Image (cartoon, grey):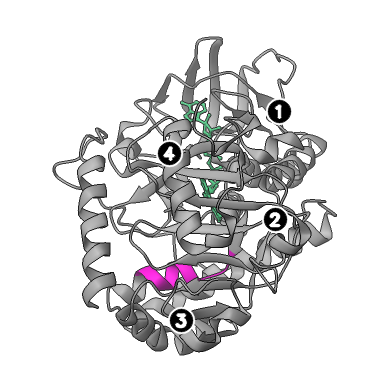
Amino acid sequence: MTNPIFHTSFKARPLWWDDYEPQILPEIALPRDVAVAVIGAGYTGLSAALELSRAGVEVLVLDANDPGFGASTRSGGMVSGGVNVGKRYMSKAMSDAEAAPFLNDAADAFSHVENLIARENISCGWTKRGYFLGAWCQSHYDAMAKKVNVLNAEAHSDSYLVPRDRQRAEIGSDYYRGGMVVERAAHLQPALYFKGLLNLAQKAGVTIAARTAVSGLTQNSDGGWQVQTPRGTVRARDVIIASNGYTGKTTPAFERRLVPVGSYIIATEELTPDLAATISPKNRSFADTRRVLTYYRMSPDGKRLVFGGRAKFGMTDPLQTAPLLYQFMIDRFPQLRGVKITHSWTGNVAFTMDETPHMGKLDGMHYALGCNGSGIAMMSYLGHQTARKILGKSNRVCAFDREEFPTHPLYTGNTWFLPYLGYYFRTRDWIDRRWN
Ligand SMILES: Cc1cc2nc3c(=O)[nH]c(=O)nc-3n(C[C@H](O)[C@H](O)[C@H](O)COP(=O)(O)OP(=O)(O)OC[C@H]3O[C@@H](n4cnc5c(N)ncnc54)[C@H](O)[C@@H]3O)c2cc1C
């Protein structure tokens, strides 16, 4: 590695895995019959399985890899309750009344994770110190002004605008044209949150078949399912698809509704205390309104900056994206020039055609899919909601549980167009920053 940005201890894997990495579980004999088979052992699948198992339902979770191998141990660890959903809805000029149910459920998603972590004593660095959304250009700042009231009324965000001349109180940078603080936001160590969920699921009696890819799903005449794997077939009364950005050919109906996109992160070496103190004076987490989004926060020990973004839109080696992310980081924090990076990694997120998460039932399969880049709270919540629906315990219909789960006539799962979308977004960003 000749690039001087890389530390001698550099690893192309998540920083979080230094504390907990996806474990090889003992191989189990597959049961012949279960009540519910869950495909995917991330936050979504385990949240659903936990709720079902605690209600006395026999659940089998199958994962093609070691549990947690997907996005759930790779994320930025930033937890927000509504601001992302709100951003999407309001950028599409939906009325407040239309946006309200989604924001209400997004706020509930935040409460769900916060309460779960507290109630179950999950030690995962939960830090509720708010979030600062930096405006990439003046027009984005003006648009935020229109969102604040709705976010506060419907998502209980405790949000307020911060003009450019006061943003130094929130972030050690002059990069943005002002921004918005959302006090009801947190950050955590995502792999430790995953470990906590996995432990709870195992204690509740959930059976987990690791390294067992589901290769086919066939519905029986009685409505039940044959779940095919290279290790044998399992009969299940219900199936839940929880494969998000790793959804593939086994479920073509979902593959064509989800666009998997790589998201990339770097972590710096431990900063000197003086330098670390310049980044996030209130220990907030950060993101911006740029189309080629960046998001970042300090590590739980406050010593490193963990800096993520859509450095590339296709799936690329995180070694290639590290220098790009490094430059984005220096653009925002010139004081970090010369700091080395110790980790660089990637994982898949799943975008939907309407840029909102979905749960429901399609072709007889339950699903909770489409995190759109922000799923720690949302996907945990939708997994839980899916289980409650199967149990007949939902006292109302979740706003994300909708009949329509849109497709695009030209898309069946091939993401050849993503690099071109990346060029387009970068050009739009450049125009916005210069002229708007
Ligand atoms: C780099 C990165 C940064 C992110 N940052 C944030 C953030 O800061 N805040 C936030 O809220 N969200 C963030 N996210 C999103 C968040 O991590 C995801 O929304 C969440 O982890 C999705 O959980 P999941 O259980 O739905 O999917 P995953 O955790 O991705 O799990 C899906 C699982 O399905 C399995 N699978 C797929 N196909 C099959 C099959 N046929 N058979 C068996 N198993 C199968 C896979 O092996 C995988 O383990 C980020 C994601 C990434 C990648």
Between the residue at mark 2 and the residue at mark 4, the CA separation in whole angstroms equals 24 Å
Report the residue marked by disc 4. 321
Label 3 CA crowd tier, 10 Å (few <14, some 14–19, many 20+): many
- Tell which tag, 2 or 4, sits nearer the viewer: 4
- The residue depicted at 26 percent of the width and 48 percent of the height is 422
Measured from the top left, where is residue 156 in percent x and y? 59, 82
Q: Are marks 3 and 2 in contact (CB under 8 Å)?
A: no
Q: Residue furthest left?
A: 410
Nearer-N-terminus badge (1/4): 1
User: Measuring 75% from the left and 59% from the top, which residue is drawn there?
Assistant: 126
Label 2 sits on a secondary structure element that is: loop
What kind of secondary structure does the magenta stretch mostly adopt?
A: helix
Tell me the residue that label 1 is attached to.
207
Asked if residue 241 lies left or right of residue 50, the reply is: left
* Ligand 1 under 8 Å from disc 1 Cβ: no
Q: Nearer the viewer, mark 2 or mark 1?
A: 2
Query: Disc 1 on helix, strand or loop?
Result: strand
Mark closest to the chain's N terminus, 2 or 4 = 2
